[in-house]
Amino acid sequence: MYTNCVQCGQPTEIEVGFYYGTSYVSYVFGVALSVTTFLLWWLIIGVSFTDNRFLYWIAFNTLLLVGLQPWLMRFSRSLWISWFVSYDPHWRENPPEDLGRTNDAQMNNW
């Protein structure tokens, strides 16, 4: 991920650990997607434990979630930062300032 937005220069790493909350947002989207695929599978194909249709749905849903995970995380990060950083239409006249809440020595220190 870029350190600053390529369009406006807004710092994307606002503070250390800022994006930990995106895991909750991504989880909610994953659960909603799973419930939606289960309901569609149940209406179109049906669910039965005797002929493995339920296991086929689990395999399908797992592959779908694994395939969509990069998109879900990117979307969750975009949604998360939009909740905490407001859009400034006059960003060229008022460039974003460095808030000093980041510690470069601790960045990516897992």
Image (cartoon, grey):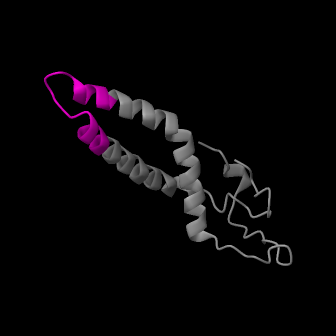
The mark tally for this picture is: 0
- Estimate the x, y position of residue 65 in percent, counting from the top left: 44, 37
Q: Is residue 39 magenta?
A: yes
Q: Magenta residues, as a range?
A: 38-58
Q: In this view of the protein, can residue 72 be seen by the observer?
A: yes
> Would you say the magenta stretch is mainly helix, strand or loop?
helix
Quadrant containing the C terminus in the rendered view = top right
The x, y position of residue 18, in whole percent, is: 58, 59
Q: Which residue is rendered at x = 75% and y = 76% of the image?
A: 89
**Can you see residue 17?**
no
Judge whether 91 appears above or below 77 on screen.
below
Residue reaching furthest to the top: 51
Residue drawn 72% across the image and 70% down it: 99
Along the line of sight, the residue nearer the viewer: 94 or 41: 41
What residue do we see at 80% from left, 74% from top?
91
List the single residue furthest toward the left: 50
Point 56% across, 60% down: residue: 79
Residue 8: x %, y % from top left: 79, 64
73 to the left or right of 28? right
Q: Does residue 24 sit above or below 108 in this rendering?
A: below
Left or right: where 102 falls relative to 7: left
Residue 39 image-quadrant placement: top left
Q: Residue furthest front?
A: 44
Q: Can you say whether 45 is above or below 78 in the image?
A: above
Magenta-drawn stretch contains 106: no
Q: Would residue 106 appear left or right of 22 to someone viewing this image?
A: right
